[in-house]
Amino acid sequence: MSFVHLHCHSEYSLLDGANRIDDLIAKALEFEQPAIAITDHGNLHAAWEFQEKAKKAGLKPIIGMEAYVAPGDRRQRGRAAPGDRAYYHLVLLARDIEGYRNLVKLSSLAYTEGFYSKPRVDRELLAKYNAGLIVSSACMAGEIATHLLADRFDEAKLAAEWYANVFTDRYYLEVQAHEAGEQKKLNTEVFRLAKATGLKVVATNDSHFLRAEDHDAHDVLLCIGLKKDRLDADRMRYDNGLYFKNADEVRKHFPKHPEVLENTLAIADQVDIAFTKKYHLPAFPLPKGAKTENDYLVKLATAGAKERYGAKLPDNVKERLDYELGVITKTGYAGYFLIVADFIQAARDRGIPVGPGRGSAAGSLVAYSLKITDVCPLRFDLLFERFLNPERVSMPDIDVDFCEERRGEVLEYVRNKYGRDCVGQIITFGTLKSRAAIKDVGRVLGFTPAETDAIAKMVPNQPNFSLTVKEAIAKVPELKKLYQQDDRHQQFLDYAIALEGLSRHAGVHAAGVVIAPGPLDDYVPVCTQETKGASIAANDERVVVTQFDMNALEKAGMLKMDFLGLTTLTVLHHALANIKERGREVPDLATLPLDDEATYRALRAGRTAGVFQFESPLATDLVRSMRADRFDDLVATNALMRPGPLDAGMHRVYCRRKRGEEAVTYALPELEEILAPTYGVITYQEQVMRIAQRLAGISLAGADVLRKAVGKKDVELIRNEIDKFVAKAVDRGYDKHIIAELAAQIETFGRYGFNKSHSVAYSVLSYHTAYLKVHFPAEFMASLLSACIGDTDSVVKYINAARDLGLEILPPDVNESGYRFTVISDNRIRFGLGAIRNVGRSAIDSIIGGRQKSPFISLYDFAERVDLRLNNKRVFEALLHSGAFDSLGGHRAQHAAAVDSAMQAASLAQNEIATGQGSLFGDASASPKSTMRPVLPTVPELSEHERLTKEKETLGFYISGHPLEPFRAEAEILASHTVTSLGTWSDQPMTLGVVVTSIKRQISKKSGNEFARLTVEDFSGSAEVLVFPEAWAAISDRVVADVPVLLKGAYGRRDQGADNPTFIVESVTRLAELRTTGQISVAIELAPDSALSAGVLADIRAVVEAHPGSSPLEVRWQGADGATARMRSASLTLSPASNALLELRALLGTDRVQLVRGG
């Protein structure tokens, strides 16, 4: 006799169940069990994937859930009564489609109405939604079990009778085939209760892991979820027996009760659920006069096309429009297009920036006509079939980019239009990926963070090269050695292998939105998730999301789309606003020509900071290397910067051919028109489709099937489609060898080909950002910096980029700064108050309001005119140390000394006004103390070190100076890299000119010796570097905070291939000492009219003799022929200290004295 598991937990009983769905199905088939149920804790996350995979494997799926049942009203909150539980467990199984729908309702309402620590139903809901459900009394945490184990037999009997009355013959008592805790006693009591009530009993095993030997790995998983050390005595543990047993293992626990196994088979026989493939699309609310969605779509698309192309549509436009509309209306997706067009138009009506397009939707002329996209598909030869294939119909997928700051308003519009209960966000699951698994497992096993971090870094984890823990042990020698030679590490890594890939936590998809024809939980289960900033426009602590992820929702026929927040759109929007505010002519980005030479010149020069998609070193090098001079180059760059094309070397071929270093050849003349824009390199998926159409006569819809086959890397499917292409092309008269060679290219390059529609749309944004940066640098950089408020590293990076453009970044000022960075003149930007730490938005609004009538004139005046409830002492100190009070008279030390008295006096003044007559804020003349303000105390100024240190604490970086500034020349001359250029592994030695801002000393567990992690900073930004014990022992006394140094070192060998390799310091030299070594020379340039004149040379000699040192003096001047002559003195050397340089610059001019590499 067989057996069916009716109480089983998958990995979606998050950090509690360790069973993978595929493994459960395989094990059930191995045990010749006819069916299996998955009953995860309170949710149906696994339901769709499980039923689909089980049916495919020939196994009957039983969809279930182990519900949490509130002892009273599900809406009540508070502690449980003494001796009672906060919730009971109850197993619910769907018998038929009605039962499945009721299960969906119960699971959803448990979250939306009953969530209190856990999602809870109650008896009211169970009674209301009981139809089609089979129920069992669950584990020791069940209501019946709780009474029986507390020797409350009568109460257990009453509870069982209530369930039996509601669920009739569909209610079972449950015994379990293990001996955890008091399970043996419970089983005895359950049989006694069954005898007293006549209820049937069913055997389960509450399976949380697959095999008996998986218990320890599951225990580690449990500790991860509980955030406990595995050695903690005071924590929950599971019995060794809660694994997926075969029938014999279950039977031996119940030798006198074979019926408990038979009942599992009987229950499985009752289950009959069939899901139909059906799309659940909401109806678009048609305006008066519109008969059908199809008619209305045709009307809007035609009108939109005429707006784009003119009242008389060109033949190619009309032909393409009619074709697309025919496909869309026949496939029933007119409503989908209307919905998307409507909320995009609503966004534009509200002034919310919308992207020009994203993904394959940019290939649709209908989408362009409806202003869903802003890229003409005919101009760029973009294909509709790549978006919606009439021969292989699947739900179209239109993802939309909105301004990051305001996308929530669009979702709110959709919620209001289609019903709040019909619109939801989408769940996403974080998994225990290789490095995460190592870190989590290491933590619960007592490894230190440093140890786990070091081991995790041994596992390659890049987009183009990543390994599982198991693969890394086999392929990374250092990790393999650790695994083989150390039992402690072997056990650690074995657990990581066992747990890797399991779902770890649920979250809210950053952009996913689903719209249903009616209440969402009529179609799919929903739950609630903590937002933690992930939700779109969620004001509540928890937001409603679907229990199914994106893939399951699509298979369930739901309309899903992505509302993405794109910061670039926010940057462009505010840059245009800055341009308008300054009275300059605002460019229309929608009609901006894409051929501005100055823009391409800047890109070729590598000035890509802030340019969308092109900021990375890789993209910058690629644009520079190819000598980009046209929009097609930007499109190609966006497509070639992917792991596949890079690994295949396609980017190098493209660059060589564009530069004329390699001939561009075409196997057939017909290919030139298709491949000429990419110099004969198959770069885009659309090119594969065009080749199949042109040479084999395959329709574009059929060619899309070939494109998908190649992209999926399905060997059998690829072979089938490639063979079809070859046969048809040869039948049309093409040479078999040429076609076979071309087919091989398609298979190789087409596998990595990128979606041209997406690349074109995003390249438009790349061009727009580059154009504004070139032609409106101050307005663009102010907007870019404002978008980075809260991200100190980015602010530092872009301040440096702004300075490279000749822009001056002024410190914050309470009289001139707004929340954002603002443009003061063509080349000056004022720092935004929002970027100062500890200064909130409400405090800033109070400051701006306080200066409306007149500027603040002193610290005391400022204190009186701002709301001190919002601007507390912490805010005052942040403002003064950032330099925001510098314009109020006095210096920062005086402001620091006067803050308390200024705030106290202002508080008294505000209280007098509040209790008498007059304005509380913003009217200084109303204050009785306004003419009697005290003067600032007389105190010494802060030292430069103190000033800069406080500035860095407040802003996250230095703005009025930099400890490295006196040694800028040495840093630039001698450093091979800047801090922000670190990050790409190389085997070459490197040098950094930096100041050390933080020293973290640690002890190596391996050797017991001290090593250090240093935070270092140069003008470009900051990073952490590592000093191993041997080097640290030699240099530790030379490393002092804020002292400029030259670090020499390299990347570690074990970091080769790592996504963020660590710079290993080998030696350190103070930059001040380098001035005595002769490595730095002082170069002076004489003006033509003073070249070699005795008076000038005498003055120079006097300065040199006053500052003796070891740096050679080099004299440069322009000869009669116009060439630069230079002479290095054999006898004159000097100290290149600041005083000497200042005197020489005063004598000759700032630009005519500089430090250069000696030798």
Image: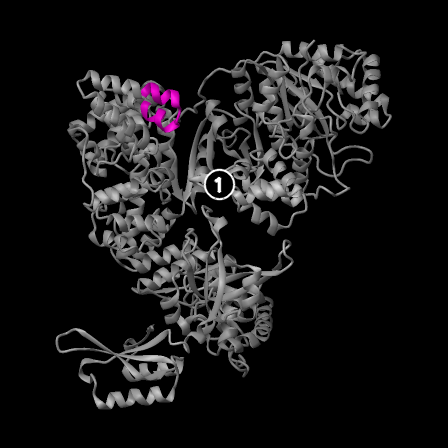
Left or right of 287 in this view: 913: right
Query: How far across and how far down the image is residue 406, in percent?
Result: 43, 45
Q: Give me the residue at 76% from left, 23% from top.
A: 178
x then y, percent, for residue 38: 62, 22
1034 on left or right of 720: right
On the question of residue 153 being in view, the answer is yes
Residue hosting label 1 = 536
Would residue 163 be found to the left or right of residue 590 on screen? right
Residue drawn where x is 34% and y is 18% of the image: 720
The structure's colour scheme is one colour
Asked whether 912 or 17 is in front, the reply is 17
Q: Which residues are magenta?
A: 706-721
Does residue 676 lie above or below 1123 as drawn? above
Quarter where residue 181 is shown: top right
Q: Considering the numbered disc 1 on the image, is that residue within a helix, a strand or a loop?
A: loop
Q: Is residue 331 magenta?
A: no
Amino acid found under the numbered disc labelled 1: Ile
Q: Find residue 6 and report its image quarter.
A: top right
Q: Residue furthest left?
A: 1121
Q: Quadrant of the N terminus?
A: top right
The answer to whether residue 1145 is above or below residue 229 is below
Q: Is residue 959 above or below residue 46?
A: below
Magenta highlight on residue 712 = yes
Residues 904 and 155: in front is 155
